[in-house]
Image (cartoon, coloured by chain):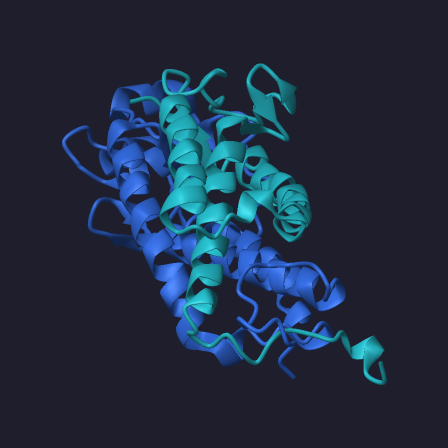
Chain colours: A blue, B cyan
Amino acid sequence: MRCAPVGGDEVTQLLGDDARWQVHGESLGQGRLSRALGADQPDPSRARVADWLGEGHDTMMAGVGSYSYVAILGFVLLGCLWLEVALRTRVFRRWKRLLLSISPAMVLFVVWDVYAIAQGHWWFDPDLILGIHLPGDLPLDEVLFFLAIPLASILTIEAVRSVKSHWIVGDEPPDGAPTP
Amino acid sequence: MTYTQLAVASVLVVVIADLWLLRTRMVTRKVFWTSYAILAFFQLVTNGMFTGFGVVKYDGAAIIGETSPDVGPPPFLGEGRIAFAPVEDLLFGFALILLTIALWVLWGRRGVQRTPMSGPPIWRRGA
């Protein structure tokens, strides 16, 4: 796990003798930093400092920071919302049907997500998500994921129907007459 | 259960639901597979961003591939990964997409906001 907290001694070793580091906007000498990172202090910032000290901090999303996850979701929405206008998918006008479709899928997949997080199947870089957690240690970002992806799915199938109006979807009116 | 097992099971459960429980039969329809092809392409792109930038990381004990590295992206292709993401994510995504679309069509079949139907595209206004 990348965010295993490190003890003050390890940080001291990493820092070397005359290192000075910016912590929370303050320039700190080694002694103060060691104290700030005291081993008895259950402070997540210790893990973050450990990240800074690691070589080549692996976030290419550095400028986006804690909005990285939602920025990617923004990319998803950018890719599908235009369909509502350009292909007249009329999904938002059918918002009750939309909610009735998204919510059961969301409940099932959130249950899976909470289980997977509890089992350690996957985890999230705390620097790249909003930092708001729901019960079950579920990041808010994940809940938004289970809104965005089902929405994109429904917009996509309605967009395909818009272009291929003769393809059977399965919800056509019983008499088969196209509805205006 | 591992992520691999859960991912396979989820696809089986959702396909069974689509065919026999909800009877939406989306997996028999061209419109579904066309939509899925589009969605799967974008899934590879966005999932590649999630996993390539290290927003989400995976435990090697739960997937076919190895644990995501502490620093830098996991393999792009191979070693149980596709576009940085575990291949299991494709099954996860398929189950989520199929379930959502099957439910959408189910409500339409039952007359819940069947209309207004989608289309035509704006460029076919006069058609």
Q: Nearer the viewer, residue B15 or A168?
A: A168
Q: Is residue B28 placed above or below B60 in the rendered structure?
A: below
Hey, which residue is sitting farthest front in the picture? A175
Which of the 4 image quadrants contains residue A172?
bottom right
Q: Is residue B70 left or right of residue B9?
A: right
Q: Is residue A73 left or right of residue B44?
A: left
Number of numbered discs on residues? 0
The quadrant of the rendering that contains the C terminus of chain B is bottom right
Q: In this view, does B42 lie to the left or right of B4?
A: right
Name the residue: 26% across, 28% down.
A119
Which of the 4 image quadrants contains residue A35?
top left
Q: Is residue A161 placed above or below A136 in the rendered structure?
A: below
Q: Is residue B106 placed above or below B14 in the rendered structure?
A: below
The answer, for residue B126, to whether it is visible in the render is yes
Q: Is residue A51 left or right of residue A156?
A: left
Q: Nearer the viewer, residue A105 or B76?
A: A105
Q: Which of A135 and B55 is in front in this view?
A: A135
Name the residue: 57% across, 80% down.
B116
Q: Is residue B51 placed above or below A94 in the rendered structure?
A: above
Name the residue: 26% across, 36% down.
A115
The answer, for residue A127, to whether it is visible in the render is no
Q: Which of A96 and A68 is in front in this view?
A: A96
The quadrant of the rendering that contains the N terminus of chain B is top left
**Horizontal and vertical percent for residue A109?**
35, 45
**Horizontal and vertical percent for residue B98?**
49, 47
**Horizontal and vertical percent for residue B58?**
42, 27
**Horizontal and vertical percent for residue B114?**
50, 74
Name the residue: 41% across, 38% down.
B16
